[in-house]
Image: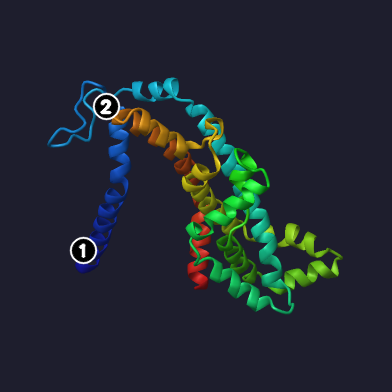
């Protein structure tokens, strides 16, 4: 019994250490953003707790840079990209999981193979396509590369495979079409997987720096990653402001995960049980 308690204590201690290591950079970033101008952020030994916490750095960032515009652009682009990915990925996954047709396995293999190709290899042709379509400096140009991902199709296919075919056959007997079955029967049953895909898509789009940097040259369309980079170039001598801008860009990701963690964890556990 004593050894069991020691084992549990050791596990919790290890988890606590991992949590501290994971949260450490964010806590240090937040501490730097809250420190006043009279404090030395490079002092040794370093101090995590600000001596005089202040929100002045956040207000200075908002006053000197159009961060609210960057925030609006990021929210709009991320929201549209996540919605498009959920719809198109689940639509593409449905026939791969529930229908029989020639070449289905080949298409799925090609889909999985495309996940191994880094975006840097596709960057130039995607850019040429966007320019030819007149998508430079537009929200549509920012959204389209994220509108449907191979990972999303794979994840939704695996979720659809876990649903009994009897439900689909019953719906067909009732006269529902394939599209109605997808919308009314299958999607409500894979909400955890949809939430998981939404979180991953949101994090990927929200933190994307390379593609907006390539397709945009109008600051009015800048997203938060570009805004933080511009802030770092403008205030390279005052890392308090840079840290405040970085905290601005991180908080929405934390909020999305907190509100969706129930479905996210449920989807992860379901996949682990199926494993």
The quadrant in which the N terminus is found is bottom left
Query: Residue 49, percent across and down?
Result: 23, 32
Q: Secondary structure at mark 2?
A: loop
In front of the other: 185 or 228? 228
Query: Residue 232, percent across and down?
Result: 36, 33
109 vs 52, left or right, is right
Q: Which residue is mark 2?
A: 35
Q: Which residue is mark 1?
A: 6
In front of the other: 151 or 49? 151
Q: Residue at x 68, y 63 (%)?
A: 92
Q: CA distance from mark 1 to mark 2?
A: 40 Å
Q: Residue at x 23, y 63 (%)?
A: 5
Q: Quadrant of residue 220?
A: top right
The residue most toward the right is 175
Of the two numbered discs 1 and 2 on the same chain, state the one appearing first in sequence.
Answer: 1
Q: Residue at x 58, y 41 (%)?
A: 77
171 vs 122, left or right, is right
State the colouring used for the structure image.
Answer: rainbow
- Label 1 vs label 2, nearer the camera: 2
Q: Is residue 55 above or below residue 153?
A: above
């Amino acid at each position: 019994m004593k050894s069991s308690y020691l084992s549990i204590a050791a596990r919790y201690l290890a988890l606590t250490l991992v949590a501290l290591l994971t949260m450490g950079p964010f806590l240090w970033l937040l501490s730097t953003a809250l420190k006043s101008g009279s404090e030395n952020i490079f002092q040794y030994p370093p101090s995590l707790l600000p001596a005089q916490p202040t929100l002045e750095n956040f207000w200075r960032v908002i006053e000197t840079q159009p961060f609210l515009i960057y925030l609006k652009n990021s929210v709009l682009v991320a929201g549209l990209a996540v919605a498009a990915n959920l719809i198109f990925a689940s639509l593409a996954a449905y026939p791969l999981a529930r229908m029989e047709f020639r070449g289905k396995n080949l298409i799925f293999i090609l889909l999985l193979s495309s996940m191994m190709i880094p975006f840097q290899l596709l960057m130039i042709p995607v850019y040429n396509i966007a320019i030819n379509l007149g998508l430079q400096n537009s929200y549509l140009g920012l959204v389209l590369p994220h509108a449907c991902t191979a990972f999303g199709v794979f994840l939704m296919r695996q979720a659809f495979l876990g649903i009994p075919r009897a439900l689909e056959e019953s719906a067909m007997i009732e006269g529902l079409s394939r599209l109605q079955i997808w919308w009314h029967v299958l999607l409500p049953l894979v909400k955890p997987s949809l939430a998981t895909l939404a979180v991953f898509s949101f994090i990927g789009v929200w933190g994307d720096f390379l593609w907006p940097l390539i397709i945009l040259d109008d600051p009015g369309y800048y997203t938060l990653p570009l805004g933080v980079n511009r802030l770092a170039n403008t205030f390279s001598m005052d890392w308090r402001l840079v840290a405040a801008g970085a905290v601005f860009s991180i908080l929405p990701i934390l909020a999305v995960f907190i509100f969706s963690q129930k479905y996210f964890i449920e989807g992860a556990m379901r996949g682990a049980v199926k494993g």
